[in-house]
Image (cartoon, coloured by chain):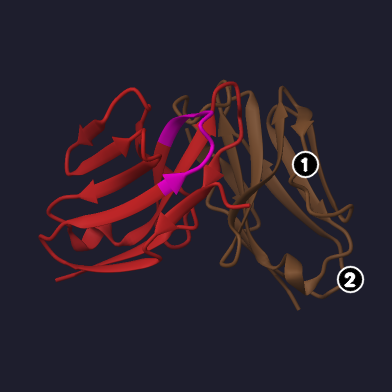
Amino acid sequence: QQQVKQSPQSLIVQKGGISIINCAYENTAFDYFPWYQQFPGKGPALLIAIRPDVSEKKEGRFTISFNKSAKQFSLHIMDSQPGDSATYFCAAIGTGSYQLTFGKGTKLSVIP
Amino acid sequence: DAGVIQSPRHEVTEMGQEVTLRCKPISGHDYLFWYRQTMMRGLELLIYFNNNVPIDDSGMPEDRFSAKMPNASFSTLKIQPSEPRDSAVYFCASSLIGRPNYGYTFGSGTRLTVV
């Protein structure tokens, strides 16, 4: 049972454009929602994260939008650059839990 | 700090052989996690340790898989016998306290191919 659904599977964006990746979850016990960035041949690395009591979090060009009632959250990458080309994973973890549940990932390609 | 170190980076083995993957966590981290990544299933948690003790191995797919953590600086994931469907990238991660906002760091992974 996939507890975190991520879309799209792949995304091609022009340099300077906005990349948007969406995730939806089912488990209301989740209390922390990180996003990971993975480059080929590397492990996932924490990019940005949000708690459900906040509707938006921004770090540089990266913004998470969170809709608790809809159980959805999304990653926006503003002014996308070729160096942002990577696979992005949304994830969730519940209170007292040590198990991250990952989405299936989105392969982002930013073309010049 | 060198981060989480995994070895080997690539492993090709024949079906039926024993495979051992190795992980050195970040010094001072008291949680260690083993994940498997495949195209079909994405990233799956196999097992995790706290202070060298296995806490939850419910993600280990079969008895052919076993993991140990003999000390705070070393862990192994063993597959015996290996099968082609075990082909995947295996990641080790370590963390302080076990939460992603406490330095949850992944290694670069071991790409396993079973032929």
Determine which quarter of the picture holds residue B54. top right
Q: Is residue B90 left or right of residue B114?
A: left
Label 1: which secondary element: loop
Who's the residue at 63% across and 23% down the image? B30
The chain that hosts pointer 2 is B
Q: Is residue A31 magenta?
A: yes
Colour chain A is painted in: red
Q: Could you say where residue A42 lies in the image, as x and y percent from the top left?
A: 47, 55
Tag 2's secondary structure? loop
Of A93 and B114, nearer the camera is A93
Q: What residue is shown at x 64% (from left), y 28% (from top)?
A: B31
Q: Residue at x 57, y 20 (%)?
A: B97
> Can residue B3 be seen in the rendering of this structure?
no
Residue kind at label 1, given as amino acid type: Ser
Query: Which residue position is annotated with label 2?
Result: B16
Count of marks placed on residues: 2
Q: Is residue B71 above or below residue B39?
A: above
- Apparent side of residue B29 relative to residue A15 in the rendered image (left or right): right
- Boundaries of the magenta span: A24-33
Q: Residues within 10 Å of mark 1 (few under 14, many from 20)?
A: few
Identity, as a three-letter code, of the amino acid under mark 2: Gly
What numbered label is drawn on residue B58?
1
Q: Colour of chain B?
A: brown
Residue B42 in view (yes/no): yes
Q: Is residue A44 left or right of residue B92?
A: left
Q: CA distance from mark 1 to mark 2?
A: 23 Å
Residue A109 belongs to the span the image colors magenta: no
Q: Position of residue A87 (x, y in %)?
A: 39, 59
Circle 2 packing at 10 Å, graded few (<14), some (14-19), many (20+), is some
**Residue lying at the far front of the rendered structure:** A69
Pick the residue in front: B41 or A39.
B41
